[in-house]
Amino acid sequence: MTDNRKCGIEHYFINIPTSKEKLGLIKTTLRGKSLAFLTSSSVFSKKRIDSGTRLLIEAMILPETGTILDIGCGYGAVGIAVASSNPQLRVVMTDVNQRAVQLAKRNLEINKVANAEVRCGYLYEPVKDLKFNCILTNPPVSAGMETVRNLIAQAPQVMTEKATFQMVIRSKIGVKTLPAIFNKTFGNCQVLAKESGYRVLSAEKQ
């Protein structure tokens, strides 16, 4: 767990939001499934599924079985899309934002998803007891490059052999820096998709 100071200035990347909760509801289709998401203030992209998250969801490459991590899950769009697409997968969603965690838990119920859980904590602290076949993230870039760098660099500690790490980023942000961090961490990096000013990077643990 971390405190607001460690999380930087990004309003949604804090442990305990102080703004008044204002609930909203998003209804959408992801990977061919009709889904609904309860959202709120002080949570990322509260009015719609943002373009980067949607690109990651539609482009992500998933194993047939195994355990998936959605790190920085927000209200749960990525993790719930994964879990609803394949009941054979176990999905763990994490976020440092307690409001986001509570929303993600409610969204599991709304979408009748039984093969997923939500944990609260900073980066990989809440899942250090697990190993994952795939990690997915729309990282909190506005929290600072150090946070994003740690998100990538620490990932192998909780990954199985041949597991993949898939991250969506804005094409104009870290276009050289982030692939370099991928290559330093994993020894490889590829672009899975590019669209609407975003790209999805992927690497495999060797």
Image (tube, grey):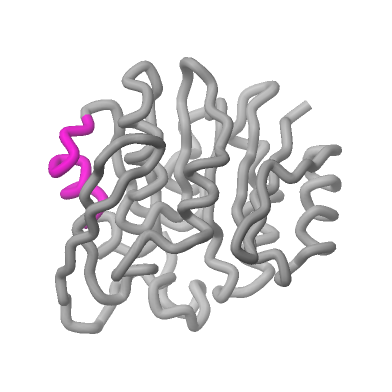
Q: Residue at x 31, y 31 (%)?
A: 84
Query: Is there any visible trace of residue 193 in the rendered image?
Result: yes
Q: Nearer the viewer, residue 8 or 47?
A: 47
Looking at the figure, which quarter contains the N terminus?
bottom left
- Per the picture, the main secondary structure of the magenta-coloured stretch is helix
Percent x, y for residue 139? 55, 60
Percent x, y for residue 79? 38, 41
Q: Residue at x 84, y 62 (%)?
A: 176
Q: Residue at x 68, y 21 (%)?
A: 161
Taking the image as shown, residue 166 lies to the left or right of residue 107, namely right
Looking at the figure, which quarter contains the C terminus?
top right
Q: Residue at x 45, y 55 (%)?
A: 72
When the figure is inspected, residue 131 is found, relative to residue 154, above or below; the finding is above
Query: Per the image, is 108 magenta?
Result: yes
Percent x, y for residue 148? 64, 62
Give, as a single range, the part of the protein colored magenta.
103-113
Query: Per the image, is 174 magenta?
Result: no
Taking the image as shown, residue 44 lies to the left or right of residue 108, namely right
Q: Quadrant of residue 169?
A: bottom right
Q: Nearer the viewer, residue 45 or 133?
A: 45
Taking the image as shown, residue 95 lies to the left or right of residue 25, namely right
